[in-house]
């Protein structure tokens, strides 16, 4: 029927009826196409989900097969046991198995290629570090804070003051000793001046200090002066002789004249030479005094700077109590020692007085030279005139008195020089400090011999070979990680041997202890990965038993039990120092423990001897106390495996606690991880670079398309589908990653 324009309906012709059918056919075909595509798309989405789920289950199954020994001993997860591909394929087969007797298979999913790839071995540092962090992130901070920080916290204030005190006194001591050596040189030049005057011809020609009979010889000034009256008498006697009578005293007069002239000339020459030598030596002595004054001003500058300098680094990062303040135990005594250092300084007037002494000695020598010249002139006059006896006698008396005054002041007893020597000795407590230095050097020698006995323990060929194998494992892991990261590790850490200066060793140990306290303080502000790695090492690796060194420390046998120096008996020490020798790591540990004990005991020594007065005497006594008690601590450590922290804080510190402290200071995290991995590989025989801790799995599946493969191919080409159409099947691959 079709409606006419006027509103009436008419019957359709036979040819017009087909258009309606075609229209409905087109509509129906579109609907069918849409539903066909949606049905296959839904099937493909379901297939993707099922394959992905199966792949996830499979990769988890693969990772569930971890190595039991590695986990039980080291808390680490890595693949072990059945091959990964076998587990993965079996799991996929179980998850994607056929539908059995079902008449209708909505998803006839067929499994294609399936395999597992390594995504990271536990031997690589990022993965190893990640597992250690997970293992220790809750345990390490609590254990470390409770066990270590609280033990050492109360010591920080006193040790900080001790470090500042020893640092200041050690600097001043070096300059003080240098100043004293220069002043001693100046005094030595004064003595040389006096000795030259004594060794000159003056004492013999005047004479001085000789018997009366020797003094009256004609060859002396005294003899010339005393004999002048007789000389005048000879002249008068010959002048008043009878006419025709021969002179009776010609020979005597000639001999007197000759002796007088020679004596006067010799005195004048000796006086000039003595004055000239004094002038040269006095310039040298004055220069030495000026040098000593300059050193004294350096000391004054150091003292001034010390009073405005910041406190030694490290200790302030770990407050002595929970409120952040510093304990007063011992700090007041230590500050009082530093307040006394002004006693080591000399005022400028002191050096001026010393220079004046030297100048007065030169003036005294010049006065002798002048008196000798005057005596020579008086002799010339007296020989030419019989009326010059009084002048000659006066010139001799002046010469004799001038030399006697010089001799008394500078030769015997040499009061001027001797008083200066005594003043310096009393001011510097020289004898006491010399005795202290000698004793301290002896005690330091005892400590060095004790430590050398440890480093000199006998090593077997098997032990040496074991460390060589360990070194090869370390080098292999180090090289692999450097290649992976593109960065080289830092140089191997170690410890310095003891030197020969007791005070210098005390200072170095205190500064090193500041680094330990700084590391402890940093743990309170944030918990870095270093702490996790350190505590993991303490928790999982074996440390040396110090009691096995008893005989060696006591000076007895140098041989230990056969297994004492094996790798597996000193794992923690190796992680700390990284030496590839049986005794080196243990010796380094004991050397550092001694240094720490020396710093603590030196601080005690400063407090206990703070009343001795002279700051350098206090320092010397403190160093001796530190060396003696630190050596005793080492013996106690090998006897009991622990020491008291301090006489001021009686807390037990065990051998492994010392190692935990040193781990804060030594070695990069990369070094420590490579050493840990090398130890694990040495002990287990595993190759951690070949043990997966992360994998990726790939599974390929396909499903038959029911309707329009061409349409699906178009969707795949447009990247609407994840997979691709191959023939009449849709195929896709799922890639899943997983790690411990």
Image (spheres, helix red, strand yellow):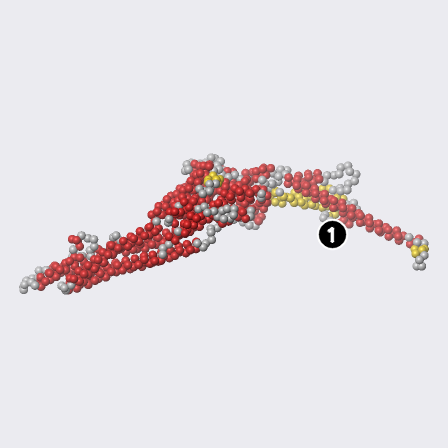
* Above or below for 401 versus 322: below
Q: Is residue 548 above or below residue 32?
A: above
Name the residue at 45% across, 43% down: 648
Rendered location of residue 547, percent (x, y): 46, 37
- Label 1 Cα neighbours within 10 Å, binned few <14 / some 14-19 / many ≥20: few
Q: Residue at x 5, y 63 (%)?
A: 242
Q: Can you say whether 403 is above or below 99 in the image? A: below
**Left or right: 144 with respect to 720?**
left
The residue to which callout 1 is attached is 718
Foreground: 264 or 632?
632
- On the image, the x and y values in percent for residue 85 come to 66, 40
Q: Is residue 241 left or right of residue 666?
A: left
- Residue 243 lies in quadrant: bottom left
Which part of the image, by quadrant, shows the C terminus? top right
Helix, strand or loop at disc 1?
loop
| Image-based side of 232 in relation to 21, left or right | left
Specify the quadrant of the image occupied by residue 79: top right
The answer to whether residue 342 shows anywhere in this view is yes
Give percent across and percent down for residue 385.
14, 64
For the residue pair 182 and 82, the one nearer the viewer reads as 182
> Residue 305, located in which quarter of the rendered image?
bottom left
Q: Position of residue 715 (x, y in %)?
A: 75, 50
| Rendered residue at 16%/55% (across/down) | 216
Q: Is residue 598 visible?
A: no
Task: Name the quadrant of the N terminus.
Answer: bottom right
């Amino acid at each position: 029927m079709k409606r006419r324009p006027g509103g009436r309906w008419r019957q359709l012709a036979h040819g017009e009826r087909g258009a309606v059918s075609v229209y409905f056919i087109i509509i129906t075909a579109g609907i069918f196409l849409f539903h066909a595509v949606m049905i296959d798309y839904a099937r493909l989405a379901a297939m993707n989900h099922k394959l992905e789920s199966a792949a996830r289950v499979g990769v988890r199954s693969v990772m569930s097969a971890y190595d039991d020994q590695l986990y039980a001993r080291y808390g680490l997860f890595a693949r072990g046991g059945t091959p990964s591909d076998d587990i993965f394929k079996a799991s996929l087969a179980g998850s994607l198995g056929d539908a059995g007797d079902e008449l209708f298979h909505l998803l006839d999913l067929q499994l294609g290629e399936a395999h597992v790839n390594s995504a990271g071995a536990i031997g690589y540092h990022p993965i190893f570090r990640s597992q250690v962090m997970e293992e220790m992130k809750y345990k390490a901070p609590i254990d470390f804070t409770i066990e270590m920080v609280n033990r050492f916290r109360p010591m920080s204030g006193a040790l900080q003051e001790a470090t500042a005190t020893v640092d200041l006194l050690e600097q001043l001591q070096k300059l003080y000793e240098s100043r004293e050596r220069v002043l001693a040189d100046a005094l030595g030049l004064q003595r040389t001046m006096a000795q030259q005057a004594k060794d000159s011809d003056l004492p013999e020609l005047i004479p001085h200090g000789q018997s009366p009979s020797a003094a009256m010889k004609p060859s002396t000034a005294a003899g010339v002066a005393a004999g002048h009256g007789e000389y005048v008498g000879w002249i008068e006697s010959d002048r008043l002789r009878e006419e025709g009578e021969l002179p009776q005293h010609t020979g005597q007069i000639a001999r007197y004249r000759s002796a007088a002239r020679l004596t006067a000339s010799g005195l004048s020459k000796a006086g000039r030479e003595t004055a000239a030598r004094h002038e040269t030596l006095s310039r040298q002595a004055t220069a030495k005094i000026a040098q000593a004054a300059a050193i004294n001003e350096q000391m004054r500058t150091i003292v001034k700077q010390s009073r405005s300098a910041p406190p030694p680094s490290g200790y302030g990062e770990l407050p002595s109590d929970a409120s952040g303040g510093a304990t007063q135990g011992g700090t007041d005594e230590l500050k009082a020692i530093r307040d006394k250092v002004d006693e080591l300084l000399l005022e400028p007037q002191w050096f001026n007085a010393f220079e004046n002494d030297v100048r007065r000695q030169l003036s005294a020598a010049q006065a002798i030279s002048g008196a000798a010249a005057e005596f020579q002139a008086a002799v010339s006059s007296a020989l030419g005139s019989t009326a010059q006896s009084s002048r000659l006698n006066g010139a001799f008396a002046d010469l004799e008195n001038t030399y006697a005054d010089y001799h008394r002041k500078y030769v015997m007893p040499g009061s001027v020089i001797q008083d200066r020597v005594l003043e310096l000795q009393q001011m510097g407590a020289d004898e006491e400090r010399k005795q202290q230095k000698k004793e301290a050097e002896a005690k330091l020698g005892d400590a060095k011999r004790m430590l050398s006995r440890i480093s000199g323990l006998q090593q077997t060929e098997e032990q040496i070979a074991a460390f060589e194998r360990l070194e090869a494992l370390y080098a292999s892991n180090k090289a692999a990680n450097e290649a992976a990261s593109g960065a080289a590790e830092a140089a191997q850490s170690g410890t310095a041997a003891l030197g020969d200066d007791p005070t210098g060793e005390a200072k170095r140990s205190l500064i090193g202890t500041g680094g330990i306290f700084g590391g402890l303080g940093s743990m309170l502000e944030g918990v870095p990965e270093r702490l996790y790695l350190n505590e993991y090492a303490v928790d999982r690796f074996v440390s040396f038993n110090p009691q096995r060194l008893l005989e060696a420390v006591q000076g007895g046998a140098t041989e230990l039990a056969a297994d004492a120096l094996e790798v597996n008996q000193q794992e923690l020490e190796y992680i700390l120092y990284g030496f590839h020798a049986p005794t080196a790591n243990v010796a380094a540990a004991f050397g550092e423990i001694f240094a720490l004990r020396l710093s603590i005991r030196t601080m005690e020594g400063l407090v206990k001897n703070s009343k001795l007065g002279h700051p350098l005497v206090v320092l010397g006594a403190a160093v001796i106390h530190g060396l003696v008690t630190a050596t005793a601590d080492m013996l106690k450590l090998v006897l009991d495996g622990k020491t008291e922290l301090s006489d001021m804080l009686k807390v037990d510190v065990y051998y492994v606690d010392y190692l935990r402290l040193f781990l804060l200071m030594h070695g990069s995290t990369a070094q420590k991880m490579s050493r840990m991995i090398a130890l694990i590989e040495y002990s287990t025989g595993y190759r951690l670079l070949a043990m997966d801790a992360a994998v990726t799995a790939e599974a390929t599946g396909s499903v038959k398309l029911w309707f329009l493969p061409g349409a699906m191919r178009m969707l795949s080409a447009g990247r609407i589908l994840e997979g691709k159409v191959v023939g009449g099947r849709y195929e896709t691959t799922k890639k899943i990653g997983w790690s411990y």
